[in-house]
Image: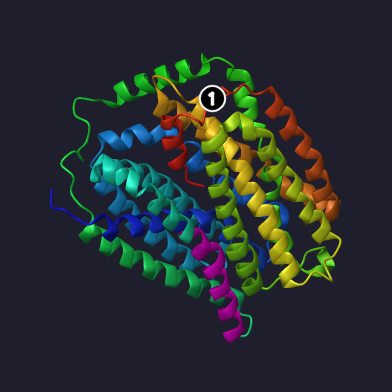
Amino acid sequence: MKHRNPWSWIPTLYFTEGIPNVIVTVVSLVMYKQMGLSNAWITFYTSWLNLPWLIKPLWSPFVDIIKTKRWWIVSMQLLLGASLAGVAFTIPTHWWLQATLFFFFLMAFSSATHDIAADGFYMLGLDSHDQSLFVGIRSTFYRFAMIFGQGVLVMIAGNLQVVFRNSIRYSWSLTFYGVTGLFIALWLWHRFILPHPRADHPREGVSSGDVWTEFAKTVVTFFRKPYILTAIIFMLFYRMPEGFLTKITPLFLIDSAHNGGLGLSPQEYGLASGTVGVVGLLIGGILGGMCVSHDGLKRWMWPMVCAITIPDIVYVYLSYHTLSAGLGVVSACLFFEQFGYGFGFTAYMLYLIYFAQGEYKTSHYAICTFFMTASLMLPGFVSGVLQEYIGYRHYFILVMFFCIITFIVAKLVHIDPNFGKRKDDIEEIEKIEE
């Protein structure tokens, strides 16, 4: 294998991994809102876009037996570039909704497959020392991608709307053409710079039937684990308030004041939510990992439950001060709420690691992520309809009542008091990516 400096491909690989995820899950919401789609339809359609990540465990084993992981990475990046170009091309057309949803779904599928291949390639392309060294680096650049997508791209689209006199479709089309160019450059770079590890080859002697048999065995052993019922309840309902907020809060921030929203411009949204809010999320996540590594997960469970629920009150406050809340106040509120979410979400991610322990650790963790994705996807289907029916103010008050469910499921769950204190647990904590 020709040696490649990990600094030449780790940062760009994980920056590339993060961009399509944030575009599909966040940027699409802002774009559809600006293009006049109702909240009910936006949340319903975009919730379906989570499906590829939901069912990712079903086809992840096939990535191992078909082609190399390097081939998957390069191919998916090319397909991601094509899907971005498809969105850009179809935005100005009369059939923009059906076409952009198709290309967003293609983007989501390509991104989920890229995630599988990139995480596997990371372990093949680096020795154990470099794997530990670059865990924080890859996580950092994935987070930079969140800021770039949710912050910079939205602000670029807003500035283009000023330049082209509020031509929303044309501005978003140009923005996506720009991201397409970026992805072509990243695809060319990785096609050249990614190493060729000797261990990166399809699994030999394994048929699709063997894969399905192994998968079935994994599922059976998962549902035979102790405390399985309370574990699934925790995975599905711990983030219930966030499940109802995720799709609605971006729409609330940019919706007009006469609809009960804050009326932020894309530039203001990109700064307040896409930059300040994301920074709060990252700091909260880092601090959460540090706390658990010192005292264990059980010791910090209740502070994290409070952190992921109580700060949601800021949306109730903002919904009653839509005319007086300046950008500084909005940014401070979003930083506070996202910091709390990042801190509280650490407990959720570490519980997935804790529950997945055992003989089929990797496969069981993949099944846990199925429930993790479902915990946000399912509330998303009805969140828009519910918000339109009762309005933003009553909707956010209702979300605060949903926070009670988080406390209940946290009380039910079983956690080893020593988990998080041991050296091997700390290593797992360091590998968490928000």
Color style of the picture: rainbow
The answer to whether residue 121 shows anywhere in this view is: no
The front one of 92 and 191 is 191
In the picture, measured across the screen, residue 317 lies left or right of residue 303, that is right
> What is the span of residues highlighted in magenta in the rendered image?
145-164
Residue indicated by mark 1: 418
Taking the spot 44% from the left edge, 42% from the top edge, the residue there is 430
Residue beneath the point at 63% across and 31% down: 299
Q: Which amino acid is tagged 1?
A: Asn
Residue at position x 28%, y 46% in the image: 130
Residue 9: tell me if it is visible: yes
Quadrant of res 327: bottom right
Where is residue 284 shown, x and y percent of the image?
A: 59, 50
Using residue 292 as the reference point, say whether residue 264 is left or right of it: right
Residue shown at 58% from the left, 32% from the top = 297
Mark 1: which secondary structure? Answer: loop
Q: Is residue 108 above or below residue 335?
A: above
